[in-house]
Image (cartoon, rainbow, N blue to C red):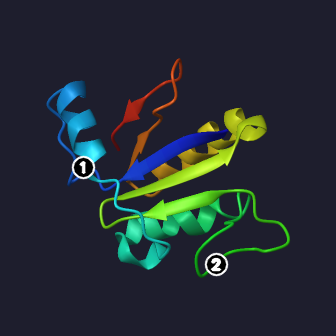
């Protein structure tokens, strides 16, 4: 099982209520292996986050040390991290999202969920 984290282009996401955001989130799940299709902030987030959570897929895959599967879209990037690293992954992902002015969403039950920059 993997621990999922999503970052997103805050300008593209609705801020009205959780239900509207979740509907938008579900519509964004078009996986791609190329991190370069997202916004500049999303690409920088991936570059920073993947230093500690290297990719197992895509053009930057690390065959030896990769731990995290990524899915990229124009308005959202999803990371599927090892469960054992969940606490560090969530903290790092949120901090890096804030630094790069992208939104952060944690779809895992019981965790802090949605943050806009």
Tell me residue 19's x, y (percent): 21, 26
Q: Residue at x 62, y 38 (%)?
A: 91
Q: Secondary structure at mark 2?
A: loop
Question: On the image, which quarter does residue 17 sit in?
Answer: top left
As drawn, which residue projects farthest toward the right? 64
User: Dividing the image into 4 quarters, which one contains the C terminus?
Assistant: top left
Tell me residue 64's x, y (percent): 85, 72
In the depicted structure, whether residue 48 falls above or below residue 3: below
As drawn, which residue projects farthest toward the bottom? 59
As drawn, which residue projects farthest toward the front? 1
Total residue callouts:
2
The residues tagged by marks 1 and 2 sit, at their Cα atoms, a distance apart of 26 Å
As drawn, which residue projects farthest toward the top? 110
44 displayed left or right of 114: right
Tell me residue 102's x, y (percent): 38, 53
- Numbered mark located on residue 27 in the image: 1
Neighbor class of circle 1 (other Cα within 10 Å; few <14, some 14-19, many 20+) is few
In the depicted structure, whether residue 101 falls above or below residue 50: above
Question: On the image, which quarter does residue 67 sit in?
Answer: bottom right
- Numbered mark located on residue 2 in the image: none
Q: Nearer the viewer, residue 90 or 81?
A: 81
Q: Disc 2 designates what residue?
A: 60
Tell me residue 76's x, y (percent): 36, 57
**Contact? badges 1 and 2 (CB < 8 Å):** no
In front: label 1 or label 2: 1
């Amino acid at each position: 099982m993997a621990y999922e984290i999503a970052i997103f282009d805050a300008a593209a996401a609705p801020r009205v209520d959780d239900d509207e955001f979740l509907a938008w989130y579900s519509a964004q799940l078009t996986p791609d292996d190329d991190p370069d299709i997202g916004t500049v902030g999303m690409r920088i987030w991936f570059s920073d986050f993947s230093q500690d959570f290297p990719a197992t897929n895509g053009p930057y895959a690390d065959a030896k040390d990769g731990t995290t599967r990524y899915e990229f879209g124009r308005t959202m990037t999803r990371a599927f991290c090892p469960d054992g690293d969940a606490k560090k992954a969530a903290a790092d992902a949120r901090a890096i999202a804030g630094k790069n002015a992208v939104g952060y969403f944690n779809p895992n039950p019981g965790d802090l969920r949605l943050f806009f920059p």
